[in-house]
């Protein structure tokens, strides 16, 4: 009787909790303030998240938000110190607020004592990096080290849940390593729970996912994972329960499909340029067909970031190991590399092939807007080409300049868009930051040395550019008559 009363109470509280916090608008001003919090005492799992990068921090903070006691562990002491002071080492909208809130509620802690974190938790999420080597193979050394540490410190039944993107069969590898190191003294389950977060919108993606994939092979682990994700289950977010191998495969296929979609629209954009058609209208025209879908059809300078380039290569590599040649994924990568060259050629054409001595204002250094991440950013490739052509560069990004300084310390970094544009021979817009969309073009027209502009994200109004007398180009838009 007491139990059913508790369950009823729990559901009522959960209901008010979910209706308050899970509004789609996690960007609203007070999204992390003044909410009723869930009474999840009976479901308060001790969780550790190993690895405090993008995925680990968002997952750790999100799992704490769901009412669990979470310890995020990372071997990098300075990172842990920073996090304990409420600072975060990356720019990710809403993450700092969420982390601070969960620290205050005593549900989130950070430690560099990875072994203690393992020993004191019921569920361990692995969120360490899985970088790519020169051959496209995924380097699993961090995963292996964590699996061994878990095996050595296994002190009772635990669930080990992989959030890192890992090639198919890694779950089995983790199982084998834990078994070996723990000498099978304790029972454990390995689960694959791939993360589909987008940088720049990662908190929202964690709290409002399109779906949750669980590669879970025992009822016991499934029940516990369901408890942990109860707030999402209550909201009818689709859950896919499957095998480890299938869950691992889903992640690679999702990223490869999205990468293919981008390469496809970039090719279409190049066609549109040739025949004077408008790629954005074409994208809308096809995207309204539900079978195609309207998302991920924005042409641009080619995809970058920490996932698409790495995961497509890794998928190809795994397929090759299995005697398969994934021609479509291979083509998506080829088109992506070509798109960067195409962008360079278009900029070069605007400057009539004479780049030497010209001042190029680059607006946007991150691989996309709303992040400070420059990994595989098209800007890296273009800066290299511009420097090889002996052009001068004035670069600006609202968040990513410091990261780019490590790679290119000797180019000029501007303090604002206006500063970058002043005296420039050409403006090159590479990311879709809001402030670039709102660029004061008439001011730019008066401060630039030459009114020349390349818009690699199609964010500026072509009519306005034309009226102001700009010589300009973009990606796949019909020319303004
Ligand atoms: C991606 C996936 O979206 C995410 O689910 C996965 O977990 C990790 O990889 P992310 O790399 O953070 O996330 O960014 P995303 O917004 O997907 O963009 C990836 C790249 O594609 C960026 O370079 C972006 O500019 C480009 N892109 C995206 C386009 O060029 N056009 C589009 O229409 C969409």
Image (cartoon, rainbow, N blue to C red):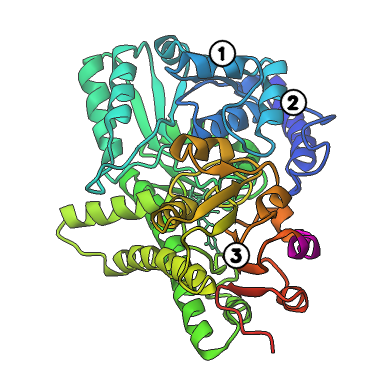
The answer to which quarter of the image holds residue 39 is top right
Q: Nearer the viewer, mark 3 or mark 2?
A: 3
Q: Which residue is mark 3?
A: 457
The prevailing secondary structure element of the residues shown in magenta is: helix
Reading the image, the residue beneath label 1 is 81
The reply to whether residue 261 is in sight is no
Query: Ligand 1 within 8 A of label 3's CB?
Result: yes
In space, the residues marked 3 and 2 are separated at their CA atoms by: 56 Å
Considering the numbered disc 2 on the image, is that residue within a helix, a strand or a loop? helix
Q: Position of residue 379 (x, y in %)?
A: 49, 53
Residue lying furthest front: 357
Quarter that holds the N terminus:
top right
Residue 289 horizontal side relative to residue 241, left or right: right
- Please state the horizontal and vertical placement of residue 227, each as a whole percent of the image: 57, 32
User: Label 3, label 1: how many angstroms apart (C-alpha)?
Assistant: 38 Å
Q: Is residue 117 visible?
A: yes
Residue 88 horizontal/vertical position (percent): 61, 26
Where disc 3 sits, the SS reads loop
Closer to the camera in the image, 306 or 28? 306
Q: Nearer the viewer, residue 148 or 340?
A: 340
Residue span colored magenta: 438-446
- Magenta highlight on residue 473: no
């Amino acid at each position: 009787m007491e139990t059913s009363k508790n369950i009823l109470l729990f559901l009522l509280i959960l209901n008010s909790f979910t209706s308050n916090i899970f509004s789609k608008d996690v960007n609203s001003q007070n999204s992390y303030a003044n909410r009723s919090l869930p009474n999840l005492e009976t479901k308060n799992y001790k969780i550790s998240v190993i690895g405090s990068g993008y995925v680990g921090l968002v997952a750790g903070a999100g799992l704490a938000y769901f009412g669990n006691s979470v310890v995020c562990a990372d071997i990098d002491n300075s990172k842990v110190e920073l996090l304990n002071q409420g600072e975060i080492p990356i720019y990710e909208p809403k993450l700092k607020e969420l982390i601070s809130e969960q620290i205050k509620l005593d549900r989130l802690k950070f430690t560099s004592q990875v072994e203690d974190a393992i020993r004191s938790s019921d569920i361990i999420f692995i969120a360490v990096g899985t970088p790519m080597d020169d051959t496209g193979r995924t380097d699993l050394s961090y995963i292996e080290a964590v699996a061994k540490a878990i095996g050595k410190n296994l002190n009772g039944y635990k669930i080990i849940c992989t959030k890192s993107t890992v090639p198919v069969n890694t779950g089995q590898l983790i199982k084998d390593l834990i078994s070996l190191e723990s000498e099978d003294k304790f029972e454990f389950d390995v689960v694959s729970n791939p993360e589909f977060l987008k940088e720049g919108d990662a908190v929202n993606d964690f709290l409002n996912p399109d779906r949750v994939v669980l590669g879970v092979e025992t009822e016991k682990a499934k029940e516990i994972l369901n408890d942990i994700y109860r707030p999402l289950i209550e909201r009818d977010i689709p859950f896919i329960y499957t095998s480890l191998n299938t869950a691992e495969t889903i992640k690679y296929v999702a990223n490869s499909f999205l990468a293919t979609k981008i390469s496809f629209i970039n090719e279409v954009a190049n066609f549109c340029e040739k025949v004077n058609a408008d790629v954005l209208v074409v994208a809308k025209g096809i995207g309204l067909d539900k079978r195609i879908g309207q998302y991920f059809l924005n042409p641009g300078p080619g995809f970058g970031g920490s996932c698409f380039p790495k995961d497509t290569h890794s998928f190809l590599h795994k397929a090759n190991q299995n005697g398969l040649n994934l021609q479509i994924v291979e083509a998506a990568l080829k088109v992506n590399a070509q798109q960067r060259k195409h962008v360079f050629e278009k900029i070069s054409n605007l400057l009539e092939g004479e780049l030497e001595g010209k001042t190029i204002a680059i607006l946007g250094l991150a691989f996309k807007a709303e992040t400070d991440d420059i990994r595989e950013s098209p800007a890296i490739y273009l800066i290299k080409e511009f420097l090889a052509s002996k052009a001068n560069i004035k670069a600006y990004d609202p968040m990513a300049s410091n990261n780019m300084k490590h790679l290119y310390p000797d180019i000029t970094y501007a303090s604002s868009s206006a500063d970058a544009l002043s005296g420039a021979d050409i403006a090159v817009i590479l990311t879709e930051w809001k402030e670039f969309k709102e660029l004061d073009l008439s001011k730019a027209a008066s401060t630039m040395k030459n009114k020349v502009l390349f818009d690699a994200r199609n964010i500026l109004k072509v009519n306005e550019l034309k009226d102001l007398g700009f010589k300009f180009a973009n990606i796949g838009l019909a020319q303004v008559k």
